[in-house]
Every structure is written in structure tokens, then in C-alpha cells.
Image: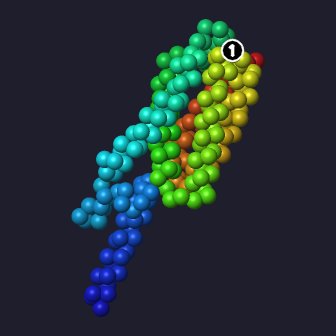
Amino acid sequence: SLPEQAGRDAKRRRSQADANSYALGGRKAGMQQQTDNGGLSVPNGRDLLTAAGFVVGVNAVGALPAVFVGSDTAWIDKPAFFPPELAFPVVWTLLFTLLGVALYRVWQTPDGPARSRALALFAGQFAVNLVWTPVFFGLRAPVAGLVIIAVLWVAILATIRAFDHVDRPAAALLLPYLAWVSFATVLNAAIAF
């Protein structure tokens, strides 16, 4: 009958809107505002501010080692493929921004063991990241830095896999980070040896 069909259609639209909301990173179905035609609009202001807080927080914490220890490269015997000095702060700002968005997306997902594991792995790899600068630049110990960055590479890979179980776009946001750390590992090895 026509009323039954209309009811099924409305239920299907609500289900699709909930699925779309989750796909865009909504922890709750209400995170994304539904438009009159059943489509999706941008996240509300509170969600945007929260996401921006994650981005700023990751950038601020990520920059602390360089602020306190510095990143003087005058002592380094630079290989031919050493990037221009300006590349480092630009690349790290972009990467930390992606990390902040990815972390926000995972944080917004429903509570559960996979989410908890993903957040714990993120915290662990980020801690390893923060240790590298004081060891490499502060102690001027490129061999020890190489050990740390190798551990970081594995930790990033584990974090990507964990994020993928919770939110695939969040995992994808970490791929440029893995690529840069892969390059940095090769660079660190060239400096160490």
C-alpha cells in the first residue's frame, strides 16, 4: 500500500542519513545537520571548534621539542637530498594538522575497544615522535635517533591499522605522515652513517 511504502522510504532515508553522518565522522547521529532534502550540511559550530582544538593541540604539543631543544642543523653533514630548512616547519605543520583531524575523527566515534586501542596507539606513537627531536638534535645522536625513528615508523603503521578499524578516512589522513617519516628515516640513516 502507499502509506506502507512511504513509511519504508522515510525509514530508508533516515538510515542513510545516519550512515552518512557516521561516515563524515559524527560520533552521534546529530553531529551532522540534516538539510530539508535529506542531504547533509557542514558540521555545527561546536564540532568545528572541537576539531580546530584538536588541530591546534596536536600542532602545539608537536612543536614543543623544537621550541625547547631547537633544531640546529649546522653540526650535520648533510646528504645531497637534505631538504631546504624551510621545508621542515611547513611539512610538520601540515602533518600535525592532518594528525589533529584524524585524531578528532577517531575520538568522535562510538566508545569501544577498537576506539580505545586506536587512541592509545596514537598517544604512544606521538610520544615516540616527541622523543626523537631531543635525542637527534639535543644530544646530537643520529644513531640513537635512527633507533627512535624506526620505532616511530612501526608505531605509525600500527596506529594506521588501528584507525582503519575505527574510521577509514582517519587512517588515510595518517598516510602522508608515514610517507614523511619514511623519508626522514632514510635521511636520518644517511646522517648517522
SS for tag 1? Answer: loop
The residue furthest top is 74
Circle 1 sits on which residue? 140
Point out the image quarter for the N terminus.
Answer: bottom left
The residue furthest left is 36
Task: Where is residue 55? Give x, y as percent.
Answer: 44, 37
Residue at image coords 58%, 31%:
180
Q: Would residue 5 be visible to someone looking at this image?
A: yes
Q: Camera-side residue: 133 or 57?
A: 57
Q: Residues within 10 Å of mark 1 (few under 14, many from 20)?
A: some
Point out the image quarter for the C terminus.
Answer: top right
Task: Where is residue 10? Give x, y as percent.
Answer: 32, 76
Left or right: where does residue 19 sit relative to residue 149? left
Left or right: where does residue 16 sit relative to residue 167? left
Q: Would residue 79 be visible to someone looking at this image?
A: no
Q: Amino acid at mark 1?
A: Arg
Q: Is residue 1 above or below residue 68?
A: below
Residue at image coords 68%, 30%:
149
Task: Where is residue 120? Give x, y as percent.
Answer: 62, 46
Q: Is residue 148 above or below residue 16?
A: above
Q: Camera-side residue: 186 or 75?
A: 75
Task: Where is residue 163? Give x, y as percent.
Answer: 57, 50
Residue at image coords 33%, 78%:
9
Which of the 4 image quarters holds residue 155?
top right
Q: Is residue 144 above or below residue 182?
A: above
